[in-house]
């Protein structure tokens, strides 16, 4: 490194001011781009000219143009300057914790994803997961790399990958297994209110698969939140038709029971992974997708 570089190397802010004015062809537009005043930009350029001992711009009332020395300097520092900025950004990204933005449905997150997340974060302790919770529609803001949604494989505008299907079964509080109306055989379901998630379709499909005398599948309570549905069942308000995969923890804890575990109905819908077809996802997102499939495949 020569003596000039050691003692007179211009500050980065002076070079940035020069480069921005040269690229915009205006002190005013450069000031706007850098969120500084026009006089501040002008002073920085003057300091650079004094440090180098050359005039970099020909100034007039309405225009600004590079001198031959200015054009040569811009040509020489352009690529190295951009590389230096990129190096700083890369270093800052490594220092900051990685954040993976995903979109998921509340019931999926609460009962399946969140209880398993520690398995993933133990592998990648520096990673932070940020979940956007949404129901029905897909929001998918720019920072989100993937979404986990319930439905069919057809999601216009997205690439889809199958994640997991769900198996539905009658589920209730253990209190409903006792007393004069205890659930002992499927016909006993007719003695208890049915609990529905948004509509009666699931119970209707279950009844078609397992015809049960006296069961009025269009009766009972309807809620529009799967979390509330599970809580109604826990509190003994009736019998819900829920996914085994999403209620396994409540069953293990004894809060819920499956009175007829053999009467399983595979649901026609499933959970799918959604990504944007023309959006490059990060390596971390790809590893997260692989982990999700691993978890879904082994039923852990």
Image (cartoon, rainbow, N blue to C red):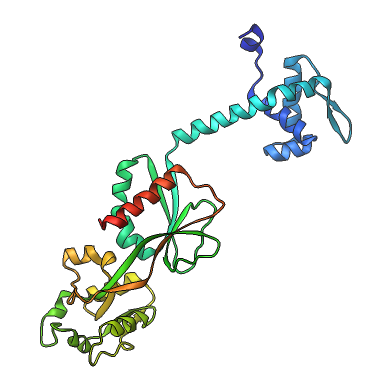
Which residue is at the front of the view, 112 or 36?
112
Could one spot residue 39 in this view of the protein? no
Q: Which residue lies furthest to the right in this view?
A: 61
Q: Residue furthest left?
A: 179
State which quadrant residue 2 falls in.
top right
State which quadrant residue 268 falls in.
bottom left
**Position of 42 relative to 212 (above/below):** above
State which quadrant residue 164 falls in.
bottom left
Q: What percent of the width, then of the height, locates residue 146?
A: 46, 54
Q: Left or right: where does residue 85 sit relative to residue 242?
A: right
Q: Quadrant of the image for the N terminus? A: top right
Q: Quadrant of the image for the C terminus? A: bottom left
Q: Left or right: where does residue 295 sit relative to residue 41?
A: left
**Position of 115 relative to 239 (above/below):** above
At a point 77% along the width and 31% down the height, the residue shown is 22
**Position of 219 relative to 288 (above/below):** below
Q: What percent of the width, then of the height, locates residue 263?
A: 22, 77
At a point 27% along the width and 77% down the height, the residue shown is 240
Which residue is at the front of the view, 116 or 55?
116
Could one spot residue 38 in this view of the protein? yes
Q: What percent of the width, then of the height, locates residue 29?
A: 76, 39
Which residue is at the front of the view, 148 or 175?
148
At a point 48% along the width and 36% down the height, the residue shown is 93
């Amino acid at each position: 490194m020569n003596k000039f570089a050691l003692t007179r190397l211009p500050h980065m802010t002076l070079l940035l001011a020069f480069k921005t004015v040269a690229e915009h062809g205006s002190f005013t537009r450069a000031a706007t781009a850098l969120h500084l005043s026009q006089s501040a930009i002008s002073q920085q350029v003057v300091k650079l000219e004094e440090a180098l001992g050359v005039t970099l711009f020909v100034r007039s009332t309405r225009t600004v143009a590079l001198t031959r020395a200015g054009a040569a300097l811009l040509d020489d520092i352009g690529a190295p300057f951009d590389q230096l900025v990129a190096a700083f950004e890369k270093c800052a990204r490594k220092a900051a914790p990685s954040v993976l933005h995903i979109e998921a449905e509340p019931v999926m997150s609460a009962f399946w994803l969140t209880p398993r997340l520690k398995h993933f974060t133990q592998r990648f302790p520096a990673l932070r997961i940020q979940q956007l919770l949404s129901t029905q529609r897909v929001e998918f803001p720019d920072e989100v790399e993937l979404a986990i949604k319930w439905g069919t494989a057809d999601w216009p505008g997205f690439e889809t990958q199958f994640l997991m299907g769900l198996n539905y079964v009658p589920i209730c509080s253990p209190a409903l297994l006792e007393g004069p109306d205890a659930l002992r055989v499927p016909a006993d379901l007719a003695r208890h209110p049915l609990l529905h998630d948004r509509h009666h379709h699931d119970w209707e499909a279950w009844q078609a698969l397992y015809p049960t005398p006296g069961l009025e599948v269009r009766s009972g309570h309807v809620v529009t939140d799967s979390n509330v549905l599970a809580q109604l069942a826990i509190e003994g308000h009736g019998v819900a038709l829920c996914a085994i995969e999403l209620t396994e923890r409540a069953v293990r804890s004894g809060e819920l029971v499956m009175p007829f575990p053999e009467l399983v109905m595979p649901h026609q819908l499933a959970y799918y992974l959604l990504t944007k077809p023309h959006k490059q996802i990060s390596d971390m997102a790809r590893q997260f997708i692989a982990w999700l499939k691993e978890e879904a495949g082994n039923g852990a």
